[in-house]
Amino acid sequence: MTTFAVYAANFELYPNDGEASRHLAPLFNRLRRIDFTFRVNDPAVNQGQITSDFDIALEGALGAGGATPFDLPLPPGVPQELDFAFAFGGRTVAVEIEKANREKILRDFLKCHIYLHSGADFGVVALPRNYAHTRGAWNLYQFGVERYNECRAYGFGTADKLGRILLLGFDQHETATNRPLSVTTRGEMRIQAAAR
């Protein structure tokens, strides 16, 4: 496994209206740059899959801004775990980070509904604008905004629940070169991992 230094920047919340945005914008607007790492598996193992510790880094950055850790108990039979939860200004927030798969964004919205049902006041789905997939660079944030607006337009979720879910968009860059992550940078990472 090979590790690469990466950072996230240019954070943006969507939607800008609603209770979640009014309450959480002061916290998220403080975010500037979050350093984290990508780990690239040996290409001979799982085709050089890339994982990151962005969830840990984001939780730490929010903590530095005034958020405190929160343990959100989930109902029995819910198989997945949330990435993390925190309290801010007397309200609780459950966070999902979609690192790799645009088809799972609707599932992340459902998971947020489960968290809201379980007692969280708000849900946040963090989505990079430049996820470097082997088939191209995907703007997961834009894809999430489109799905969110379709949910609103066609009644997929109640207006109350959707109004308590925020999308957090961000850009990812290589630290060493300051280049945005792309298909090219992903390929270079995999080559370097294979050479080590």
Image (cartoon, helix red, strand yellow):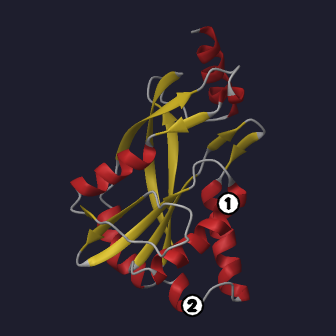
The C terminus, quarter of image:
top right
Whole-percent x and y of residue 24? 34, 72
* Callout 1: SS: helix
Sooner in the amino-acid sequence: mark 1 or mark 2: 1
Position above or below: 73 against 7? below
Q: Closer to the observer: label 1 or label 2?
A: 1
Three-letter amino acid code at disc 2? Ala
- Residue named by callout 2: 159
Whether residue 93 sits left or right of residue 2 in the image: it is left
Front in this rendered view, residue 119 or 132: 119
Q: CA distance from mark 1 to mark 2?
A: 21 Å
Query: Who's the residue at 25% across and 63% down the image?
Result: 67
Q: Which mark is residue 104?
A: 1
Three-letter amino acid code at disc 1? Lys
Position above or below: 2 against 67? above
Front in this rendered view, residue 77 or 29: 77
Whole-percent x and y of residue 150? 71, 78
Query: Who's the residue at 30% across and 51% down the image?
Result: 61
Whole-percent x and y of residue 129? 59, 51
The N terminus, quarter of image:
top right
Front in this rendered view, residue 94 or 77: 77
Q: Which mark is residue 164?
A: none
* Callout 2: SS: helix
